[in-house]
Image (cartoon, rainbow, N blue to C red):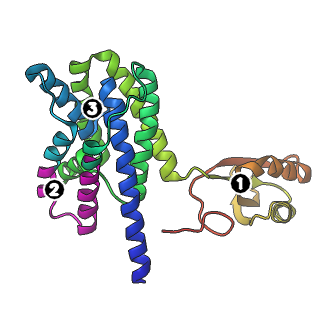
Amino acid sequence: MNWIRNKQQWRDYLLITLGTAVMAVATSSIYDPAGLVTGGFSGLAIVIKQLSQMLFGKGVPLWVTNLVLNIPLFLFGIRMSRDFLVKTIFGTLMNTFWIAVLPVLQLVPDDRMLSALFGGVLMGAGIGLVFIGNGTTGGTDMMAALIQRKLRHYSVAQVMQVLDGIIVIAGIFVFGIHASLYAIVAIYVTTKVTDALMEGMNYAKSAFIITAHPEQVADELMKELDRGASGIHIKGMYTGEERMMVFCVVGKKQIPQLKQIVGTIDPDAFVVVSDAREVLGEGFQTDFS
């Protein structure tokens, strides 16, 4: 089993390396030139760079701020689980490294809306890859986890929202409300892209079918769609009648065919279809790692 564990570790570090590189491009080549402060230590680094530029004529490099802010967190977080701490340190160092060495590209000059959208996609993809690699890049994520140890009645997510909110507000004072509104768009896009990567882009559909002919419906679904089906005993609370509900998970392209099958057998059937994220098992994704 050690070789499997080693393979997983190599995969995780590769994903973290790739993810931090994508994040660095979004930070230094899109967010920084457009003045978009989207929270996190990268956003705070952009604020500090702009302020130092205004006060001293030369801005503090983003990578310097990112590294300096994270060092105290590693010292305070020394008691965290070893694997988490090592991957967080690796993620932070790689993010800092990429910000320092990658050239600043003029990808979307003078277009804040495109910067918010494209930057949000890149940042969301980068964060998603890091999370899939079971890592983080330190910053407000780690700070929130440390603060939550003292404020147990708040969740880590709530503390992180407050910290990121403070950084976004700081961006308003430095870059103005106009840039901050675009930053909110970028945050929204980032969240959606990250969620899509974490939950799986190739999601399926789950169908709950209440019918007077459950056996016939299940047989047709298994035969025509090549998907398994399960029977669940249910009871109508209004009629008191007990029935068998058919439950199955199908590909999203198979939903029209499923509706046709059910409608042909029982036009009065009651069908509920919903998204099924990250389906694992035969006929779908088989990697449980």
Residue 245 lies in quadrant? bottom right
Residue drawn at x 43%, y 35% as measured from the top left: 120
The span picked out in magenta is 71-96
**Towards the viewer: 39 or 94:** 94
Q: Is residue 44 visible?
A: yes
Above or below: residue 9 compared with residue 120 = below
Q: CA distance from mark 3 to mark 2?
A: 23 Å
User: Residue under circle 2?
Assistant: 74
- The 10 Å Cα crowd at callout 1, few under 14, some 14 to 19, many 20 or more, is some
Q: CA distance from mark 1 to mark 3?
A: 39 Å
User: Residue under circle 3?
Assistant: 165
Q: Earlier in the sequence, mark 1 or mark 3?
A: 3
| Nearer the camera: disc 3 or disc 2 | 2
- From the top left corner, tell me how far across and down residue 76 is, in percent: 12, 56
**Towards the viewer: 252 or 13:** 13
* Amino acid type, mark 1: Gly
Q: Earlier in the sequence, mark 3 or mark 2?
A: 2
User: Residue under circle 1?
Assistant: 251
Please state if 211 lies on the left or on the right of 95 as rendered: right
Q: Is residue 154 visible?
A: no
- From the top left corner, tell me how far across and down residue 172 is, in percent: 25, 21
The secondary element bearing badge 2 is classed as helix
Residue drawn at x 42%, y 27% as measured from the top left: 115
* Amino acid type, mark 3: Gly
